[in-house]
C-alpha cells in the first residue's frame, strides 16, 4: 500500500478520471463536499449531460501510480496543501494535484519564468545563462520547462539550487534525453514539478498544460527568442491572462527567432535588458497576485437544474468557443445553473474548456 489514503486517495482518483479537468474538479468538490461522494455521484451527472457510460478511474491503477511516485522519492501536493505553490493557487484553473520532487520551499519564493526558442542562437543562450545567474543572485527562483535551448540555459545559469523545472511528462521520464543528468541534479538540489503520472510520455498535447504551470506559478515571464505561434508565446499569453508580468528581450528584426519577442513588445510587453529590469517589473505587480492562497474550494456550488434550463444552455453551444458570461446573458439562466449544465456536459465528455473562461462543444 502507498502512503496515500482516505480523501487524498479519492482526490487523486477523481483527478485521474476521464473528463475531470481542473475547473470541473473544483466545482465537483463544491457540490458534493468530498471526493468520495463525488466519485459515487459522477455516473448520474454524466448521464444528465448525455454521456452513455461513465466509469471513475480504477482504484487499483491509482494505487499503482501512488506506489510508483513514492518509490521515485516524489510526493503529491494537492491544491489547498500548505506547500502548494502560492502564486499558482491563485489561478482559477490551477492544477488540483502536482507531483513534486526536490526542495518544495523554492516554490514559495519569488519566481520568474524564462522561456524561449529550442533552436536558440548562441548569443541568446549565452545571454539567458547570464540573466538567470543574475536573477538567482537577486534571490529570485528561475522557472522553466527543461527543454533544449533557452530553457536549458536558464536552468544552468540559475544553478540547480535556484531553479524549478516543470515538465510535460512523468517525473521518471527524461526529455530531452541529453538533459537526464540536469534533471537529476534539479531533483536533488532544486525542484521538479509535473501533474502527469509516472511513465507519461512527453506528447505534444501535454506541453500547453505544462506551460500554464510555468506561467501561473511565476510573478512574470521573460521570453528570449521565440517564433510566432510558438509555445513560448503561449506561455506569455497565459501569464498575461492571469495578471502576471510579461517581459521580452528585443532581437534583430531580420532574425525569425526575434519576431515573437518583438511582437510581444509592440503589443505592450515590458522590454527588459537586464536582471535589474526584471526585478523592477515584478516589483510593480498588484499585491493581489501574490496574496495568501484563497480557499481552494470556495464559492457557490453548482445547483440542480431542470430540463428547460439545460436545453437553453446546450442550444447556445457550438464548436466555436464562447464566454460563460455570454451564455448566462443569452440564456437568461442563473449563473449557478449554467455552471451545472456545463459541468454535466464536461463529465459526459461533450464540453471543452478554453483559456479566458470560454467553452465549446467537444
Image: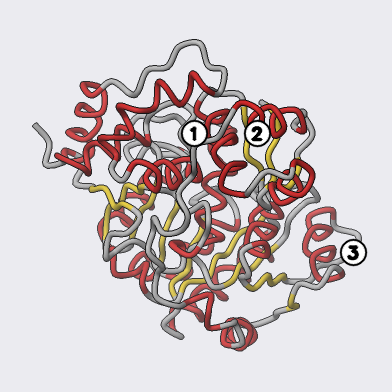
Which of 153/2 is in front?
A: 2
Q: Residue at x 53, y 56 (%)?
A: 92
Q: Residue at x 76, y 72 (%)?
A: 269
Which of 165/351 is in front?
A: 351
Q: Residue at x 25, y 28 (%)?
A: 62
Picture quadrant of residue 318: top right
**Quadrant holding the C terminus:** top right
Which of 18/209 is in front?
A: 18
Q: Could you tell whether 200 is left or right of 234 in the image?
A: left
Residue 258 in the image: state x and y as whole percent.
Answer: 80, 60
Residue extending farthest left: 1
* Residue under numbered circle 1: 202
**Quadrant holding the N terminus:** top left
Q: In the rendered structure, are the residues bearing label 2 and label 3 in contact, judged by CB atoms less than 8 Å apart?
A: no
Q: Residue at x 79, y 34 (%)?
A: 320
CA separation in Å, label 2 and label 3: 53 Å
Residue 174 in the image: state x and y as whole percent.
Answer: 40, 39
Q: Secondary structure at mark 2?
A: helix
CA separation in Å, label 2 and label 1: 41 Å
Scheme of image coloration: secondary structure
Picture quadrant of residue 17: top left
* Residue under numbered circle 2: 309
* Residue under numbered circle 3: 253
Amino acid at each position: 500500500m502507498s502512503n496515500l489514503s482516505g480523501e487524498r486517495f479519492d482526490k487523486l482518483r477523481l483527478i485521474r478520471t476521464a473528463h475531470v479537468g481542473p475547473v470541473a474538479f473544483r466545482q465537483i468538490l463544491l457540490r458534493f463536499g468530498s471526493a468520495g461522494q463525488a466519485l459515487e455521484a459522477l455516473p448520474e451527472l454524466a448521464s444528465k449531460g448525455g454521456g452513455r457510460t461513465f466509469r471513475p478511474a480504477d482504484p487499483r491503477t491509482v494505487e499503482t501510480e501512488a506506489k510508483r511516485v513514492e518509490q521515485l522519492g516524489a510526493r503529491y501536493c494537492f491544491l489547498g496543501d500548505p506547500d502548494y505553490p502560492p502564486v499558482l493557487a491563485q489561478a482559477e484553473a490551477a492544477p488540483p494535484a502536482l507531483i513534486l520532487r526536490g526542495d518544495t520551499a523554492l516554490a514559495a519564493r519569488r519566481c520568474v519564468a524564462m522561456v524561449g526558442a529550442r533552436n536558440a542562437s548562441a548569443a541568446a543562450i549565452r545571454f539567458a545563462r547570464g540573466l538567470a545567474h543574475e536573477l538567482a543572485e537577486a534571490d529570485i527562483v528561475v522557472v522553466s520547462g527543461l527543454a533544449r535551448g533557452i530553457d536549458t540555459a536558464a536552468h544552468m545559469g540559475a544553478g540547480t539550487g535556484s531553479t524549478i523545472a516543470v515538465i510535460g511528462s512523468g517525473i521518471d521520464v527524461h526529455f530531452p534525453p541529453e538533459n537526464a543528468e540536469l534533471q537529476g541534479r534539479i531533483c536533488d538540489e532544486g525542484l521538479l514539478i509535473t501533474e502527469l503520472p509516472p511513465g507519461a510520455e512527453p506528447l505534444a498535447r501535454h506541453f500547453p498544460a505544462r506551460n500554464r504551470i510555468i506561467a501561473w506559478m511565476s510573478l512574470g515571464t521573460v521570453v528570449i527568442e521565440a517564433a510566432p505561434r510558438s509555445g513560448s508565446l503561449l506561455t506569455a499569453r497565459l501569464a498575461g491572462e492571469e495578471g502576471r508580468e510579461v517581459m521580452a528581450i528585443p532581437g534583430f528584426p531580420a532574425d525569425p527567432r526575434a519576431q515573437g519577442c518583438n511582437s510581444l513588445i509592440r503589443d505592450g510587453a515590458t522590454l527588459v535588458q537586464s536582471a535589474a529590469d526584471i526585478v523592477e517589473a515584478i516589483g510593480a505587480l498588484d499585491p493581489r497576485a501574490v496574496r495568501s492562497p484563497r480557499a481552494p474550494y470556495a464559492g457557490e456550488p453548482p445547483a440542480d437544474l431542470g430540463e428547460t434550463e439545460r436545453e437553453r444552455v446546450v442550444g447556445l453551444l457550438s464548436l466555436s468557443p464562447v464566454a460563460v458570461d455570454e451564455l448566462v446573458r443569452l440564456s437568461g439562466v442563473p449563473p449557478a445553473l449554467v455552471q451545472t449544465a456545463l459541468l454535466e456536459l464536461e463529465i459526459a465528455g461533450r464540453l471543452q474548456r478554453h483559456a479566458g473562461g470560454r467553452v465549446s462543444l467537444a
